């Protein structure tokens, strides 16, 4: 199992705010003729960016607008049924929903970073490709518009939000009140799941963020920029939770991800991050 990295190792090997693609050590490591280690000039990053297809764009467009419509509908219905005597249950349920979203972001991020190949049918180019591109060009996410950034996460939230809308329109007021804690949990979980990649994008955006986003980052309500730098220490093997990042430290102390990787490698013989490394080596 991997050993925990020191603060000094993290600072020396991760992104820097004045060089967010991590090429500050270029002169020490590479000759002048060698392409930058990371960034939009990296051959692997360029190939991966070109795999973004019109069909994928259409899927993202539909998912974003469907999800936004369901968010508005559910929020209006929640306000309609909200009673102040349920506020404690609602708040506790909401916090649990946010924690669940953070763990879910880590699980998906870990799985997509660590296993599978871009060559896999359907999921490879459509869902694993952005994860490979992101490690080679961390700032690519800041050049994506709202649709490309959030399409897949909004897609995941649609079934949950759709289920809530169905419940509001088929259950009695009494039943809704009895289930209001569960409803609050699912609603906040789905909202934070939907916004995970936007929050992730903010963690890579070093200039021009609104003050309210900076406030949430500074108080660790959402993923802070310096916190996410820990994940961008090659070979990107820790701190996978990217919604709030609250679970990163405890999961690291428990060696949760490395233990899972050892078990999977023992059972299947597959090496973690093989595909990620393959794309990283495409420097010419």
Image (cartoon, rainbow, N blue to C red):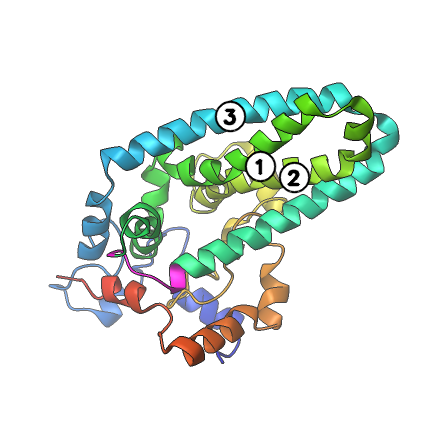
What residue is shown at x 39% (from left), y 38% (from top)? 149
Along the line of sight, the residue nearer the viewer: 141 or 157:
157
Give the residue pinned by disc 2: 186
Give the residue pinned by disc 1: 160
Of labels 3 and 1, earlier in sequence is 3
Image depth: mark 3 or mark 1 in front: 1
Where 96 sits versus 85, above or below? below
Q: Magenta segment range?
A: 113-119
Q: Quick check: 268 left or right of 2?
A: left
Q: Position of residue 182 (x, y in %)?
A: 73, 39
Is label 2 in a helix, a strand or a loop? helix
Residue 5 lies in the magenta-colored region? no
Is label 3 in a helix, a strand or a loop? helix
What residue is shown at x 37% (from left), y 51% (from top)? 18
Crowd class of label 2 (few under 14; some 14 to 19; many from 20; radius 10 Å): many
Residue 68: which disc?
A: 3
Tell me whether circle 3 and circle 1 mark residues in contact (CB < 8 Å): no
The part of the image, by quadrant, that contains residue 234 is bottom left
Q: Position of residue 252 (x, y in %)?
A: 57, 68
Of labels 1 and 2, earlier in sequence is 1
């Amino acid at each position: 199992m991997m050993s925990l990295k020191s603060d000094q190792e993290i600072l020396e090997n991760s992104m820097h705010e004045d060089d967010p693609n991590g090429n500050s050590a270029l002169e020490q490591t590479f000759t002048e003729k060698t392409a930058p280690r990371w960034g939009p000039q990296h051959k692997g990053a360029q190939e991966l960016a070109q795999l973004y297809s019109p069909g994928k764009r259409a899927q993202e467009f539909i998912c974003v607008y469907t999800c936004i419509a369901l968010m508005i509908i559910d929020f209006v219905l929640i306000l309609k049924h909200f009673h102040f005597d349920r506020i404690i249950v609602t708040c506790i349920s909401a916090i649990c929903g946010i924690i669940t979203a953070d763990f879910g972001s880590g699980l998906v991020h870990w799985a997509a970073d660590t296993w599978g190949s871009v060559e896999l049918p359907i999921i490879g180019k459509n869902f694993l490709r952005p994860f490979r591109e992101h490690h080679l060009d961390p700032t690519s996410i800041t050049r994506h518009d709202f649709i490309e950034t959030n399409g897949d996460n909004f897609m995941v939230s649609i079934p949950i939000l759709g289920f809530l809308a169905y419940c509001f329109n088929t259950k009695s007021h009494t039943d809704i009140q009895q289930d209001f804690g569960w409803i609050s949990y699912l609603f906040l979980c789905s909202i934070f799941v939907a916004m995970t990649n936007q929050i992730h994008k903010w963690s890579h955006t070093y200039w021009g963020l609104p003050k309210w986003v900076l406030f949430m980052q500074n108080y660790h309500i959402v993923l802070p920029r310096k916190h996410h730098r820990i994940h961008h220490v090659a070979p990107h093997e820790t701190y996978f939770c990217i919604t709030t990042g609250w679970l990163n430290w405890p999961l690291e102390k428990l060696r949760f991800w490395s233990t899972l990787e050892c078990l999977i490698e023992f059972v299947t013989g597959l090496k973690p991050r093989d595909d990620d490394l393959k794309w990283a080596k495409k420097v010419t």
